[in-house]
Image (tube, grey):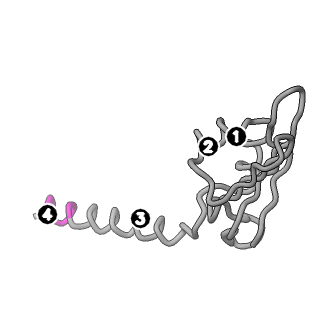
């Protein structure tokens, strides 16, 4: 009898925990700071390898490129509000084009 009650309690606890964690997810999966730290100084190939293909890209100027990702970041200082777009600016530095700035559009 105690075993059955314990199982019911354990299952209820696990389901409640899963629901709480699901409620915490609000869109993008990376904080602004962590995302910026992961992409700064990286090439487009390295960024795409880690985060997948961007939603949009401007590659017309070989010395400056722009990658736009949709809903990949959130702002922990603003109630974890998801950023609609995260824009990565890549410019030529030391002979290769790398990420030099990141902008977040709410």
Give residue 6's quadrant in the image. bottom left
Q: Which residue is mark 3?
A: 17
Q: Which residue is mark 2?
A: 48
Q: Are marks 1 and 2 in contact (CB under 8 Å)?
A: yes
Q: Earlier in the sequence, mark 1 or mark 3?
A: 3
Q: Is residue 71 visible?
A: yes
**What separation in Å lies between label 3 and label 2 (alpha carbons)?**
33 Å
Q: Which residue is mark 1?
A: 44
**What separation in Å lies between label 4 and label 2 (alpha carbons)?**
49 Å
For the C terminus, the image quarter is bottom right
| Crowd tier of the residue under label 2, counting other residues whose Cα lies within 10 Å: few below 14, some 14–19, many 20 or above | some
Q: Which residue is mark 4?
A: 4
The image position of residue 89, as x and y in percent, is 82, 50
The residue at the point 60 percent across, 63 percent down is: 28
From the viewer's perspective, is 53 left or right of 3?
right
As rendered, which of 10 and 102 lies closer to the eye? 102
Please provide the residue range marked out in magenta: 2-7
The image position of residue 58, as x and y in percent, is 75, 54
The residue at the point 72 percent across, 53 percent down is: 67
**What separation in Å lies between label 1 and label 4 (alpha carbons)?**
55 Å
């Amino acid at each position: 009898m105690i075993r059955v009650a314990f199982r019911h309690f354990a299952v209820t606890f696990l389901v409640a925990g899963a629901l709480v964690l699901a409620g915490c997810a609000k869109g993008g999966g990376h904080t602004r700071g962590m995302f910026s730290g992961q992409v700064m100084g990286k090439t487009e190939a390295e960024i795409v390898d880690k985060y997948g293909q961007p939603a949009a890209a401007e590659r017309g100027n070989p010395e400056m490129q722009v990658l736009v990702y949709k809903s990949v970041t959130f702002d922990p200082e603003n109630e974890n509000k998801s950023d609609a777009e995260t824009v990565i600016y890549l410019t030529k530095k030391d002979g290769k084009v790398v990420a030099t700035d990141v902008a977040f559009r709410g």
